[in-house]
Image (cartoon, rainbow, N blue to C red):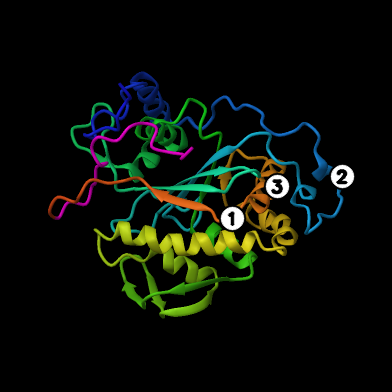
Amino acid sequence: MEPSAQDTPTNWLGRRPLRAILRILVTLAGVGATGWALSTVWPEQDRVARGAPPSVDNPASLAPYPLEPVTVLLVGVDSDTLSAASNQAAPQGPANADALLLLRISSAEPLQLLQVPVELAVQLPGSQQPMALGGVWQQGGVALTVDALQEIIGLPEGVPQRYVVMPRNGLRTVVEALGEVEVTLNETYQRTDKAQGYTVNLQAGRQSLNGAQAEQLVRYRKDSQDHPNRRIRQQVLLRAMISQVQEPSGIGIVRALLEDIAGQVDTNLSQAEMLGLAAALIASPSPATITQLPLAPRAGEQILRQLKPGLSLPLWPSS
């Protein structure tokens, strides 16, 4: 019988409960728990070091492609910078994971991107109540988040191989480095949040978004139950950004973009690896595939969600 996705929030640590508990204990003790064994999937020869200018007709001239598909966890946190003491949310406190994305990058296949619901209900060992998956990052950092995702999705050991933690200023920097991003919005979004100190004012129609406007689009929520619609809006920006990177001009801006965000993100990717992934992304066939985990219908006014019952693992990526 094939393994199935969990029907309750209590079983997601079932295969590796001891390791997950150790992650929590280490984190509570103040020790970083973000390292694990990483296999080398990049060629030893580093063409980046040669300093040869990249060719718009050959993405591999930017950097060698990974030898096999690489899965990257992107954690978008709800603080303005990595060092910010508060997430400026309501209520204020340490940063949470505001967006969780898995990207499978290969030069030989279309980009696969999975949006993981941050409102998915999970339960930590010893906890009496379930919590949102987005709060797991606050409790145990990247390592505990990876443990949770491996259990929920059915990812093999060692996947994802790399991670990037990006605060809001990192998103703004990426969009500005791309030279603004063109999107088409189906409706107008307007909201003033005095508690968080930000305003959303985006008009319907085709337009170019700067970094601050892109942040407005991905942050906007009509109410606490609007997570699914927000993920759809985030898809609009994601597709526009991917399309812009894959333009012929993308090769020429990637190096400067990575230099701009180097001090704004936390990652276990080296500069050469980031260039290699960027080259593979530019070379990958279009269009990219963006999917979401299937959720069970919402029960009443509940905010925490559960996966649709009866699913077979792994839930992603598609073969």
**Depth order, front residue of 199/162:** 162
The amino acid type of the residue labelled 2 equals Arg
Mark 2 and mark 3 lie on one chain; the one further toward the N terminus is 2
Judge by depth and name the residue closer to the eye, 155 or 313.
313
The x, y position of residue 311, in whole percent, is: 29, 35
Residue 46 in the image, given as x and y percentages of width and height: 80, 38
Amino acid type, residue under disc 1 in the picture: Ser
Q: Residues within 10 Å of mark 2 (few under 14, many from 20)?
A: few
Task: Name the mark on residue 246.
Answer: none
Q: CA distance from mark 1 to mark 3?
A: 19 Å
Task: Answer whether residue 187 is magenta in the image.
Answer: no
Q: Counting residues from the N terminus, which is met first, the one under dot 2 or under dot 1? A: 2
Residue identifier under label 2: 50
Q: Which residue is mark 3?
A: 275
On screen, 312 above or below 97?
Answer: above
Magenta residues span 301-319
Residues under numbered marks 2 and 1 in contact, where contact means CB atoms less than 8 Å apart: no
Q: In the image, is 11 to the left or to the right of 97? A: left
**N-term mark: 1 or 3:** 3
Is residue 308 positioned above or below 25 on the image? below
Q: Is residue 311 magenta?
A: yes
Image mark for residue 286: 1
- Tell me the distance, in whole angstroms, between the alpha carbons under discs 2 and 1: 30 Å
